[in-house]
Image: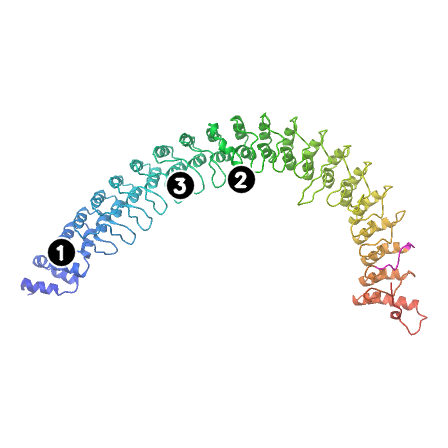
Amino acid sequence: MLLDLPNEILLCIAESFDLSRDILAFVQVTKRTSRLLLPVLYRFNIEKQHSSALCWAAQHDHSLLAERLVREYHGNVNAVHDGNTPLLYAASDGSIKVVDALLASRQIQVNWRNAKGHSALWRAARYGYTDIVKRLLKQDNIKLNIADRTQGTTPLAVAVIRGHAETVESLLTIRRVNVNKRDRRGWTPVFHALSRAISYGDRSILEMILTRPNADLLHQDEEGRTPLIYAVQHNEASLTVMLLRHPTSRTEPRDFHGRTALWYAVQQGNTDIIQLLLDSGADIAVLDDYGETPLHKSIKDGNLSTTSLLLRDPTVWAPVFALHAVNNVLPPLCMAADRGSIEMVRLLVECGWYVNEVDVEGRTPIHCAAENGHDPVVQVLLTNEQLDVNARDHRKSTALHEAAWKGHLAVANLLLTKPNIDINVEDRYGCTPLWYATRHGHHNVALRLLEESNVIVNAVCRFQTMPEKSTSLHHAVNCNATLTVQRLLVRTALNPNITDDCGRTPLCCASHAGNLPMVELLLGRSDVRVNAAEKSEQPPLWSAASQGHIQVVERLLQCGDIDINQGWGPYSSPLLAAITRGHSDVAMRLLNCVPRPDVNARTYLGDSALSLAAREGHVDVVARLLEDWQTDRNGADRQGRTALWWAARAGQARIVQRLLEDDRVLVNVLDNDGVDAVDAARTHYHFEVVGLIRSHYSRRYNNWTGGGPHNLRTRS
C-alpha cells in the first residue's frame, strides 16, 4: 500500500502536488501523514499561496498556527489577502496572541494601510481593543496620527467617536498623539468628544481630552464653528462651562456666517449661557454677515429677558451706536420701533438707550414707528424728553411726513400733540406732510392737518426725476375728496390757480374728469381762473371739450369771461378738439354759442373745423358749419386738401352730398400731389361718392361741350 512506503517517498509524493487541497487531503489520511506532511502544506502555502494561511489564522484567532508559521516557517507577516494583512485582521478581531506573534517579527510593517487607509492601530482603536492598541503603541516606528482615506479620522478620533474611553486614555498617554488633527469635516477629536457628550451624555472622553495642555479649542469645522459655538448651538450650559474653563477657549471666533457663540446663545434664548459668555468677555456688538449683532437678534426675536441681560452693562453699548455709520444696519431701537415691539422699545428707553439714534438713511426710531403706524410705540417714544420730534432723515423727512405718507391718523394725532411739532416742514423735494397726505389719498390725515391754523396749503413738489408739480388741492380734486376741497377753499391763503406738471389747474383737472359737482364747488371761489394765463396752461373749457364732458362745457360757458376760442397743444381751440375726439354734441353746443367760436381756426396741420368734421363723418356739425356764411368752404390744409376731398377719401357719402349742395364748394380742387376728390374716392373704392361727384358735375356743367370734369381741375 501507499502508506507502507518510506517517509522519504511520501514526502516526495506530497511535494509533487500542485494544489494545496491535494496536499491537505494527503495530510488528513492518518496521524502519521499529518505529522509528516503538515510542514509540506505550510511551505506550499508560504511559497505558492503568499502566506494566506497566516491571514486565515489571524482572522480566526489561531494563535498557535500563526506563531508556527511565523517562527518555524518564516511566513510573510505582511502578506495581503483580500486587501488586508494578518496584522490588520488580528487587530480587527482582537486576536492578541496573533498580534504578539506578528509583532515579534522584525519584518512586520505596523503602519501598512489598506485601500480605505486603515492601519492596524486605526482598526484596534475603532473596535476598542485597548490591549492591542497598547502593544502597537510600544512599536518604535508606529505612526499615531495616520487618518483613514474616507472620513479623514485618526485612531484617536475614531476611538472617541466609538466611545472607547480606555482606548482614548491609552492613546493620550503618548505625547505624539495629535489631539487637534482635523478630519474631512474639520472636526478635531474635541468636536467628536463634544458631540458624544451631547448625544449620549458621556463626558468622560471630553474631560480626558481637555486635560491635555495642547488641546486647541480655537479650531473651526467646515462651517467655521469652534467647539464652544457647537456646544452653545446645542443649548448645553454645563458643556459651555467646561469649555470656557480651558485656557485656549475664546468667545470672539466667528463661524462662516460671521456669528459668535453669543449670537447662538441669544438664538437659543438661554440666559444662563448668555451670562456665562458675557462674564467671559463676549462682545454684544459683533456683526454677522447679514448685519446682525447678538443684540439685534434678541430684539428681532422679541426676547425681553435676553435683551435685558445684554443691556446690563452700558459700557458696551458704544460700538453698537456706531454701527449705522459703517454698515447698512438698522440700529437696535430703530429695529424695535420698526417692528412695533412696544415692550422692547420701553425696555430700551428705560435702560437709557439713545432715542435719537439714526440708521444708514438718517431715520430715527420715531421715523420707523411712524412709517409703520405703530402708535403705541410712538406714544412711548414721545414720553422721552430727549426725543427730537422734528428729526429729519437724509430726505429731510420728519416722522409727521412718514405718518402722512402712509395714512396713519393715530400716529399723526399723537405727533400733533407736541407743541414744538413743525407741521409745515418741507422735505428735500419741497413736500409738506399735508402734501403727502393728499397725494396718497389719506384725506382723514389731511383733514386733521387742516385743523391746524398755520398749515401751509400751497406746497408744490419739486421731484427732479419724476415731475409732480401738483398741490394738495389738485390731489383732493382728482380724488373727488369733496370735504378736503371745501376745507382747502375756505383758506384765504390758498392759491387755486397753480398748475401741475401737465399744465392743469385744479379747475382744469375737474373739467378734464367731467366732475361737474367739483367744477361747481371750485367756481364758487371768486379768484378761480376759468381761462389759461399762459400758453403752457390747459384751459378748462378746452380740456372738458376734448374729453366730451358736455355738462361741464355747459357750466363753463355760463362764465361771462370764458374764452371760447382758447386752445392748448396742437388742436388750437375747444371746437377743433371736440371734433377731432369725436364729440359732435360738444361741437354743436359750441357752434350754438353767442358770440360764435372761430369757425375757421386751424390745427397745426392746417385742418379746419369743416375738414375735420367732414373726415370724421359728423353730418350735423358739417351742416351747422355750412349755415355760417363765415365758414371757409374750400380752405385747404398743408397738403392742399379741402373738406370735400377728405369726405370723398373717407367715403362719407352723406357729407359729400351736403357739401355738393353748397354752391360755394369747389369740386375740382387738386391737392399737392395732383389728386382731386374723385381720384381720392376712387383709389379707396368709394364708387358711390365718385358717382355723386360726377353726377353733380354733369348737372352743373351740362351746357359744356367736349369736356369733362377733369378738364377743369385747378389748385386751391
- The quarter holding residue 342 reads top right
SS assignment for the magenta stretch, majority: loop
How far, Cα to Cα, is label 3 from label 1? 55 Å
Q: 695 or 566, which is in the foreground?
A: 566
Q: Is residue 59 visible?
A: no
- Residue 225 image label: 3
**Would you say the residues marked 3 and 1 are in contact, meaning their CB atoms lie under 8 Å apart?**
no
Residue 7 place in picture, x, y as percent = 6, 62
Q: Amino acid at mark 2?
A: Asn
How far across and down, in percent of the image, does residue 300 sit?
Answer: 51, 35
Q: CA distance from mark 2 to mark 3?
A: 25 Å
Specify the segment rendered in magenta: 627-636
Q: Which amino acid, mark 3?
A: Arg
Residue at the image position 62 percent from the left and 29 percent from the top: 389
Look at discs 3 and 1 and give the one toward the viewer.
Answer: 3
Q: Secondary structure at mark 1?
A: loop
Residue bearing mark 1: 73
Dot 3: within a 10 Å radius of its alpha carbon, few (fewer than 14), some, or many (20 or more) residues?
A: many
